[in-house]
């Protein structure tokens, strides 16, 4: 149950785009289209942004999009806004009723 | 909107026990799988445990297997996490979450567990 690998940080100016990668293995991300992404502002409850690789829950702006290729999933945020500054975590089903989170990426809006 | 309220977090000595509770409201608790997730100070989110709607399917992260027990009372709309043989490395904020389509679409505010040596 090793954590999925994310870059520690990412940044962009308001209006720009940022993409966060999430690298797993053939036992989790590579096998299951069950990757989700969470936004976490410190001190607040995390929020689901993407599920099943590409789907957005109601209320999540379409500036947020997800994709996957092989063992790597990605979260793209376009039209960066100040409120997008947060920690982002990916997660994947890993089989045998287990789940695994990513190491987390701190997104800074410059 | 989903409401999940955790309680039971405390300061406890290593080797001790603690039971966390999660009161659920504003949704039909009895039909959802539920999970516990934790976050140690300055660290990332870590999956802890998962239970299906009727308690018949349970799984744990290797790091807590044999020490933690997840349970639920659907009549009381409450999820529990019984933690024993606590270690310093179990120190974390513990989140109660609702699972939907293998994603966590509802989160509580968390309850803090501190294990001292």
Image (tube, coloured by chain):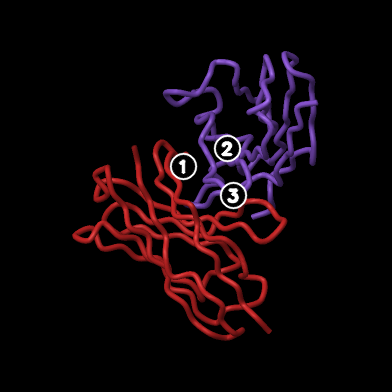
User: Viewer-nearest of labels 3 and 2?
Assistant: 3
Q: Which mark is residue A38?
A: 2
**Foreground tag (1 vs 3):** 3
- Tell which subunit mark 1 falls on: B
Q: CA distance from mark 1 to mark 2?
A: 9 Å
Of residue B92 and residue A110, the one placed in the foreground of this image is A110
- In the picture of the structure, the residue carrying the numbered disc 1 is B104
Q: Chain of mark 2?
A: A
| Image quadrant in which the C terminus of chain A is located | top right
Q: Which chain is purple?
A: A
Q: Residue at x 55, y 82 (%)?
A: B85
Per the image, the residue denoted by label 3 is A43
Foreground residue, B55 or A20?
A20
Q: Quadrant of residue A14?
A: top right
* Residue B6 percent coordinates (x, y): 42, 60
- Secondary structure at numbered mark 1: strand
Q: Secondary structure at mark 2?
A: strand
Q: For marks 1 and 3, give the CA distance.
A: 18 Å
Indicate left or right for A81 with B5 as reference. right
A104 horizontally vs B80: left or right: right
Q: Is residue A108 above or below residue B28?
A: above
Numbered disc 3: what chain?
Answer: A
Q: Determine the residue positioned at 48% across, 72% down.
A: B68
């Amino acid at each position: 149950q090793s954590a999925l690998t994310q870059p520690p940080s990412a940044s962009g100016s308001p209006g720009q785009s940022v993409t966060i990668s999430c690298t797993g293995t053939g036992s989790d991300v590579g096998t299951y289209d069950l990757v989700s992404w969470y936004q976490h502002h410190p001190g607040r409850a995390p929020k689901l942004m993407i599920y099943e690789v590409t789907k957005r829950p109601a209320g999540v702006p379409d500036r947020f999009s997800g994709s996957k290729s092989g063992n790597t999933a990605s979260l793209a945020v376009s039209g960066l806004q100040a409120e997008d500054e947060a920690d982002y975590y990916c997660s994947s089903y890993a089989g045998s009723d287990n789940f695994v989170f990513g190491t987390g990426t701190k997104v800074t809006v410059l | 909107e989903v409401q999940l309220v955790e309680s039971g977090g405390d300061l406890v000595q290593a080797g001790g026990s603690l039971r966390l509770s999660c009161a659920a409201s504003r949704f039909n608790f009895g039909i959802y799988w539920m999970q516990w997730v934790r976050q140690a100070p300055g660290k990332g989110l870590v999956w802890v445990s998962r239970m299906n709607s009727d308690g018949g399917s349970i799984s744990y992260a290797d790091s807590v297997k044999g020490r933690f027990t997840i349970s639920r009372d659907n009549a009381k709309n409450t999820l529990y996490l019984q933690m024993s043989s606590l270690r310093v490395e179990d120190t974390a904020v513990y989140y109660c979450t609702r699972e939907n389509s293998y994603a966590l679409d509802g989160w509580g505010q968390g309850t803090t567990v501190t294990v001292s040596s």
